Amino acid sequence: MAKALLDMAQISDILSVESADTFTRPIDAGNAIATVKSANPVKVITVRTTAFEPAAEGGSASDETLGGASRAAVVAGFVPNDYQVGQTGTIVALELHVAVGISGAIQHLARMKDSKVIVAINKNEEATIFQVADYGLVADLFKAVPEFAELIPAGRPA
């Protein structure tokens, strides 16, 4: 909306600031990095948060987690549409991304692969998600998730 009101192009998902008018960003579903230069007097950008170090202590920004759901989970009504990750959904770059029952379709991978630690649970040992996961468990999610839930002490955030 801001870009439309300013009549300026937006530079999305930047990975680095090279200079006051030059940025890098992923293209081709994250398979290549483009260097983009903007002559606009005001830059309208979005940032891939895991590409930058956290701000120093004492700031006033809130910390919120959004996303981690497949299109199928949204369509089935398990989570709201705002949580969808994928080509038509949100980009997430979390400290910990737990992909439960996610096959690893390119649309999903392109939007979550910059998470710091990726844990995958899938019953298909050939699922593409295991190629990007730091840790993987070949198991049926309907058995594994309840077993993990029992291990979390009551009253402690999941």
Image: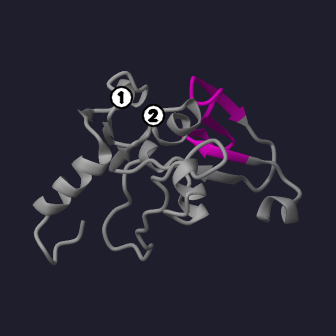
Residue at (43%, 68%) from the top-left corner? Answer: 64
Where, by quadrant of the figure, is residue 131 drawn?
Answer: top left
Q: CA distance from mark 2 to mark 1?
A: 8 Å
Determine which residue is flagged by label 2.
Answer: 103
Q: Secondary structure at mark 1?
A: loop
Q: Nearer the viewer, residue 123 or 95?
A: 123
Q: Are marks 2 and 1 in contact (CB under 8 Å)?
A: yes
Q: Quadrant of the N terminus?
A: bottom right
Residue at (81%, 48%) from the top-left corner? Answer: 9
Q: Report the disc number at residue 124.
A: 1
Q: Report the disc number at residue 102.
A: none
**In the picture shown, does residue 87 fall above or below 130?**
below
Magenta part of the protein: which range?
11-36
Amino acid residing under circle 2: Ser
Q: Nearer the viewer, residue 36 or 155?
A: 155
* Residue 62 among magenta residues: no
Residue at (78%, 64%) from the top-left corner? Answer: 2
Disc 2 versus disc 1: nearer the observer: 1
Disc 1 crowd, CA 10 A, few/some/many (<14, 14-19, 20+): some
Measured as percent of width and height from the top left, residue 41 is found at 79, 53
Measured as percent of width and height from the top left, residue 151 is found at 11, 59
Measured as percent of width and height from the top left, residue 97 is found at 36, 47
Amino acid residing under circle 1: Asn
Q: Nearer the viewer, residue 67 or 153?
A: 153
Q: Quadrant of the C terminus?
A: bottom left
